[in-house]
Each structure stands twice: as C-alpha cells, then as structure tokens.
Image: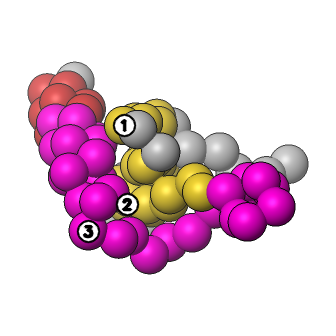
C-alpha cells in the first residue's frame, strides 16, 4: 500500500500535498510541491520546478497548506 498525503491543495496547475510523518518525538507534517504541464505533443507531465508565471499559484496553495497544518497541529496538541 502506497502512503497518501493527508491533504492536497490545488491552485491553477500547482498542487501542494501535506504528508503526516512519525518520529520518536511525535507526528509532524511535511509538504511536497508539483506543477502540471503539457509538452509539445499535448502529453501531461508533473514537475517540481516552477516558472515565474506559476509562483502566485505556488504561494497561494502553500499558504492554504500552512494554515491547514497549523490548525491541525493545534487541534492535535489540544486533544
């Protein structure tokens, strides 16, 4: 079974995935970033580099992911 992100945030062609990880100190979250694009033949691909034109979408999706992690981290510590 492949591990899946606990949450995904999409903005335009950018996606930020939130992953929950375990350590001896407790659970923590990490983020991964990808951008979808089509090549000259129209085939879809994913990339982890971002042109200037994608930075607004990257920032917006990252802020949403950050807020989700903060909310869920606070909820876990309060429980």
Within 10 Å of disc 1 (Cα), the crowding (few <14, some 14-19, many 20+) is: some
Q: Is residue 16 visible?
A: yes
- Disc 3 is placed on an element classified as helix
Most foreground residue, 51 or 22: 51
Looking at this view, name the residue that lies furthest to the right: 1
Marking on residue 11: 1
Q: Residues within 10 Å of mark 2 (few under 14, many from 20)?
A: few
Name the residue rendered at 16%, 36% in the picture: 67
Residue 51 versus residue 5 in the image, above or below: below
Q: CA distance from mark 2 to mark 3?
A: 24 Å
Image quadrant where one finds the C terminus: top left
Chain part drawn in magenta:
38-67
Please tell me how crowded label 3 is: few (under 14), some (14-19), or many (20+) other residues with Cα within 10 Å: few
Percent x, y of residue 63: 17, 44
Dots 2 and 3: beta carbons under 8 Å?
no
Q: Earlier in the sequence, mark 1 or mark 3?
A: 1
Q: Position of residue 43 (x, y in %)?
A: 80, 56
Residue nearest the viewer, comparing 41 with 54? 41
Task: Say whether residue 35 is left or right of residue 66.
Answer: right
The percent position of residue 18, horizontal first and vertical second, equals 42, 47
Q: Which mark is residue 52?
A: 3
* Disc 2 to disc 1, C-alpha distance: 18 Å
Q: From where the camera sits, is residue 73 visible?
A: no
Q: Secondary structure at mark 2?
A: strand
Q: Is residue 64 magenta?
A: yes
The residue drawn where x is 82% and y is 61% is 41
Residue furthest to the bottom in view is: 49
Q: Secondary structure at mark 1?
A: strand
Do the CB atoms of the residues marked 1 and 3 lie less than 8 Å apart? no
| Tag in front: 2 or 3 | 3
Locate residue 24, reporting x and y percent.
Answer: 40, 68
The residue under label 2 is 30
């Amino acid at each position: 079974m492949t591990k899946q992100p606990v949450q995904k945030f999409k903005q335009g062609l950018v996606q930020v995935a939130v992953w929950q990880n375990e350590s001896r100190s407790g659970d923590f979250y990490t983020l991964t970033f990808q951008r979808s694009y089509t090549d000259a033949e129209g085939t879809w691909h994913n990339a982890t580099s971002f042109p200037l034109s994608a930075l607004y979408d990257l920032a917006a999706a990252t802020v949403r992911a950050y807020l989700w992690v903060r909310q869920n981290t606070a909820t876990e510590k309060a429980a």
